[in-house]
Amino acid sequence: MVHWQRNFSQLAALANGPIEDVPRMLREADAVTIRDPPREVQIFLDHFKWLVKQMKILIAHVRDL
């Protein structure tokens, strides 16, 4: 049991970095004004916006449990 608790704690610590960093980094990248960015860059940013939104929904749902 201790083994699983330790592994879960390590996984949670690893996941917390992106949960905090990704939204901040996305806001910073989105704030940069680039005239006519390449289509692939815009798709990437839009996908990350969608992922951040899904993460927020999931976190809110888990907190409500």
Image (cartoon, rainbow, N blue to C red):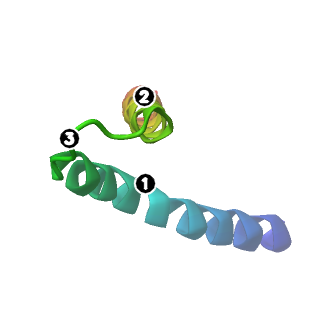
Q: State the residue in front, 31 or 36.
A: 36
* N-terminal label among 3 and 2: 3
Q: Is residue 18 left or right of residue 36?
A: right
From mark 1 to mark 2, how far is it between C-alphas?
14 Å
Q: Residue at x 46, y 66 (%)?
A: 17
Total numbered labels: 3
Q: Nearer the viewer, mark 1 or mark 3?
A: 3
Q: Neighbour class for label 3 at 10 Å: few (<14), some, many (≥20)?
A: few
Q: State the residue in front, 27 or 40.
A: 40
From mark 1 to mark 3, how far is it between C-alphas?
29 Å
> Which numbered circle lies on residue 35?
3
Secondary structure found at label 2: helix
Q: Looking at numbered disc 3 in the image, what kind of residue is underneath it? A: Arg
Q: Residue at x 65, y 72 (%)?
A: 10
Q: Residue 65: horizontal and vertical position, in percent?
A: 46, 27
Q: Looking at numbered disc 1 in the image, what kind of residue is underneath it? A: Ile
Q: Residue 46: horizontal and vertical position, in percent?
A: 40, 31
Q: Is residue 23 left or right of residue 54?
A: left
Q: Are marks 1 and 2 in contact (CB under 8 Å)?
A: no
Q: Looking at numbered disc 2 in the image, what kind of residue is underneath it? A: Trp
- Residue highlighted by disc 1: 19
* N-terminal label among 1 and 3: 1
Q: Residue 1: horizontal and vertical position, in percent?
A: 84, 65
Q: State the residue in front, 18 or 5.
A: 18
Q: Residue at x 44, y 42 (%)?
A: 41
> Which numbered circle lies on residue 50?
2
